[in-house]
Amino acid sequence: MAAKVNSDEITVQQVNEQLARLPAGVTPEQLAPATQKILSSLVNQQLLVQQALERKLDRDPQILGALEGARLNILAQAYVQRVIGP
């Protein structure tokens, strides 16, 4: 666990996934501040998600549609990368 936001956890894996998206050539001196910035961003994101859930935004039909669309896009992209890509 990298951090805890109320009852939700931010995992080391989540931080590492974000670190993997950094541009090539990040020096070791830049890595620690980048990690802190990423962790701070993930904490802020989780706080916003918690507020959205408290307001039951996850039940809004438009948001449900957007979530399903994002899910389908992620699955299709994963299929292309893992099955068709190689």
Image (cartoon, helix red, strand yellow):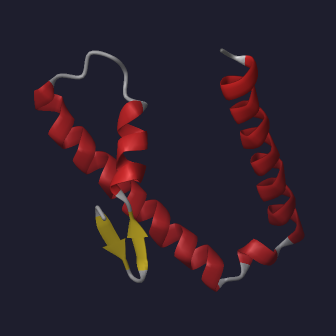
Q: Nearer the viewer, residue 2 or 52?
A: 2
Residue plotted at (43% across, 31% down)? 21
What quarter of the picture does the N terminus occupy? bottom left
Q: x, y (%) of residue 22?
A: 37, 28
Label count reads 0
Q: Is residue 54 left or right of residue 7?
A: right
Residue plotted at (82% across, 55% down)? 68
Q: x, y (%) of residue 5?
A: 37, 75
Vertical side of 15 occupied by 51: above or below: below
Q: Is residue 16 left or right of residue 68?
A: left
Q: Nearer the viewer, residue 45 or 28?
A: 28
Q: Is residue 46 left or right of residue 35?
A: right
Vertical side of 70 occupied by 67: above or below: below
Residue plotted at (80% across, 63% down)? 63
Vertical side of 52 occupied by 29: above or below: above
Residue plotted at (42% across, 51% down)? 14
In the picture, residue 78 is in which quadrant?
A: top right
Q: Nearer the viewer, residue 22 or 41?
A: 22
Q: x, y (%) of residue 29?
A: 10, 29
